[in-house]
Each structure stands twice: as C-alpha cells, then as structure tokens.
C-alpha cells in the first residue's frame, strides 16, 4: 500500500528541520520524539509566520533527543519517556510536559475498517510475545464475531529506534501482562520476542511498514493513524469497556494526572481508571539545561513554548492531542523561573 503524503513532511523534517529559512531573526533547534512531531510542525509554522523565528526540529526518536540534549548539540530535547528526578539532576536538566496524546494499535487486514476491530491488552501482549500468530486465533475471533478474520500470519511491527512511544506502549503491556513484564519489560528500547517482526524508525516508519505489509500490526501515535486512515483498534480499558481513541478518551485518561506532586513532572498515564479512558495515553516532554550559556537563545526557546501553551490548544485538539491544563502550565512556568538560569544564576523567565 502506498504511504500517504502525510508522512512525507516527516521525512523532510528529519533531514532538513521545520520552518528553516535563510534570514530568519533567530532559529531554535531541537531533536527527539516523533510522537509530537505533527503538532510541533503545526506550531512551528504558525509561530514563524507571527514572529519570524524558525524551529529546526529533528524527529529522530526520544532516545536520540535525550542524547542530543545531554551532548548540548540542540537547544532542547524532546522525549515521550520522562526522565526520573535523579536522571535530570545528574545531567543538570529540567523537564516539562507539552501535550498529551494516545498510542494506538493499528492493523492491515483486508475488510477491517478503522475503529471496528476489538482487542485487549492481554491479546496484544501475547501477539508481541509470539504466542498468537494468526488473525483467526479463537481469542481474537471471539471478540470480533461481526466479521470473519483471515487465517493469515500476523507480522509484528515495532520501533527500531529508542522511542518514547515504545516506552508508553511497553509500560502499558507491563501493567496488563505479568509475562510481558517478566520477559520483556518497560523501556524505550526492548528486545522484541515475536518471531515475525519488522522494525520501523519513528512513528512514520512503523506506519509505513503496517501500511505495506498485509497482516501487520503496529503501534503509532493517533495522529499518524488518523491522518493515514489506518485501521486502529477499539481497546479494552481498565474498567473492561472497549473504547475508541479520540480527544475525549485521552482527556479522560489524563484527568487523574497529579502533576503537582510528580517530581520533575514524571507522570505516566497508562491504564488509568475511568469508563471512558483510553488505556495507552501519555504526555510528551521537553528537556532543557538548567544553566544556559546563551541566555538570549534560551529565552527564545521559552518564548516559543509559552506561545504554544497560550495559543496552540486549538491546533493541538485538531490533531487529537490534549493541551496541558492551565494549572499545569502555571506549574511549568514556575519551574522555568526557579530552575532555568544564565551562567551568573539569574532566572531567564
């Protein structure tokens, strides 16, 4: 199946960055998670038009973003896998959430339309463990009696790069399946046990593989599934209810987040309670150094993210991301003021 044009800007973004133009008043550089790439791209274009300041963002995966900010080769890093407080302190970093969204299982099965097929977390874990290898397996067929599933081999697609999307996905599976937790675990990069598998780089790479391989299953951020009309699943949540991925189910999962008492804003939103909650929900985070050798550049970065908080909610919702609540934004801005400083120790916000 041909990959739709929505993926093309992502490939361009990896190589050339976002909104990069000669003669801009300034340019902010960042690298990391592919999960928020669609909204960062949208924000970057709107911000450039309003201010003349460009954003060069490399969509290389959360692992790459963490490496680049640690190496001080970018102004900010981006990760869907939050760093714990001790990790932040070790590297002199501050972390804050930008938006929330959902990771969704997607399949390529003839006759299966988006939002029509049901799966449970345990079944997904068993598929990725290699214990379920056919789409007409009785466990899957019993949940989907409205249509006949083919006796087709399942090809598992996963991320090949260090990925916050993988972190969120495997965190969920670790909560649902004791066997997954024991044998594979939760990380941004894991050893995938399924015998028939393909690895794709970035959310766009996984989406591309699933679209091209008949019988494939993968996991991507919802915007990639929606924009490419991929067959996403209804998924059973903690309350036993099969829910669809959308802004309402992501918001329901995010409602219980306790950002105020989360050290370093470390908060994971998988398998949250609530009848409407989407079970694979997560936030995406920005990483910056506490001590900034170029104060003017650091202020430009903070201005961009403040602008996104204040003006980017509608654009985020259009792509089915969940904006951060106002009280959380105030907590973030307090963290900026307290932690991000110039070499003399003066606050930059």
Image (tube, rainbow, N blue to C red):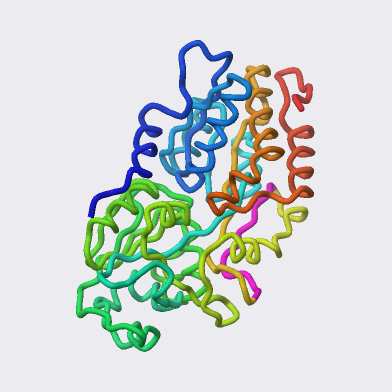
Q: Is residue 169 magenta?
A: no
Where residue 315 sits, quadrant-wise, is top right
Q: Position of residue 176 (x, y in %)?
A: 50, 75
- The residue drawn where x is 34% and y is 69% is 128
Q: Position of residue 187 (x, y in %)?
A: 46, 56
Q: Quick one: which residue is furthest to the top in this view?
A: 23
Magenta-drawn stretch, dominant element (helix, strand or loop): loop
In this rendering, position of residue 257 left or right of residue 80: right
Query: Which residue sits at x=30%, y=78%?
Result: 131
Of residues 337 and 15, the one drawn nearer to the viewer in this rendering: 15
Q: Position of residue 145 (x, y in %)?
A: 35, 87
In the rendered image, the vertical position of residue 105 relative to residue 344, given as above or below: below
Q: Quadrant of the C terminus?
A: top right
Q: Nearer the viewer, residue 33 or 48?
A: 48
Closest to the observer: 26 or 88?
A: 26
Q: Position of residue 240 (x, y in %)?
A: 55, 82
**57 with respect to 111 (left or right):** right
Using the image, determine if residue 149 lies above or below residue 207: below
Magenta stretch in the rendered image: 264-274
Q: How many marks?
A: 0
Q: Which residue sits at x=61%, y=39%?
A: 90
Quadrant location, the N terminus: bottom left
């Amino acid at each position: 199946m041909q990959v739709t044009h929505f993926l093309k800007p992502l490939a361009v973004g990896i190589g050339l960055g976002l909104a990069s133009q000669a003669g801009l008043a300034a340019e902010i550089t960042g690298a990391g998670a592919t999960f928020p790439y669609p909204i960062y791209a949208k924000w970057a274009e709107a911000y450039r038009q309003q201010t003349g300041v460009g954003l060069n963002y490399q969509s290389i995966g959360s692992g790459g973003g963490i490496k680049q900010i640690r190496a001080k080769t970018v102004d900010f890093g981006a990760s869907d896998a939050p760093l714990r407080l001790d990790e932040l302190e070790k590297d002199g970093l501050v972390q804050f959430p930008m938006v929330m969204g959902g990771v969704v299982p997607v399949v390529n099965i003839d006759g299966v339309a988006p939002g029509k097929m049901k799966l449970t977390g345990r079944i997904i874990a068993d598929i990725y463990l290699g214990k379920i290898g056919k789409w007409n397996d009785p466990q899957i067929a019993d949940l989907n009696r409205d249509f006949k599933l083919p006796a087709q081999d399942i090809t598992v697609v996963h991320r090949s790069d260090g990925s916050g999307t993988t972190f969120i996905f495997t965190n969920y599976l670790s909560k649902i399946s004791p066997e997954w937790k024991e044998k594979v675990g939760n990380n941004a990069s894991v050893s995938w046990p399924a015998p028939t598998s393909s690895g794709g780089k970035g959310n766009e790479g996984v989406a591309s593989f699933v679209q091209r391989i008949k019988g494939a299953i993968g996991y991507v951020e919802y915007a990639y599934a929606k924009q490419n009309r991929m067959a996403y699943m209804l998924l059973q949540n903690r309350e036993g209810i099969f829910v669809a991925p959308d802004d309402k189910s992501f918001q329901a999962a995010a409602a219980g987040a306790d950002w105020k008492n989360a050290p370093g804003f470390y908060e994971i939103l998988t398998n949250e309670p609530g009848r409407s909650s989407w079970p694979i929900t997560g936030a995406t985070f920005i990483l910056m150094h506490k001590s900034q050798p170029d104060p003017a550049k650091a202020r430009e970065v903070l201005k961009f993210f403040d602008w996104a908080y204040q003006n980017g909610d509608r654009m985020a919702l259009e792509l089915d991301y969940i904006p951060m609540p106002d009280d959380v934004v105030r907590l973030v801005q307090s963290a900026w003021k307290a932690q991000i400083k110039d070499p003399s120790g003066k606050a930059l916000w």
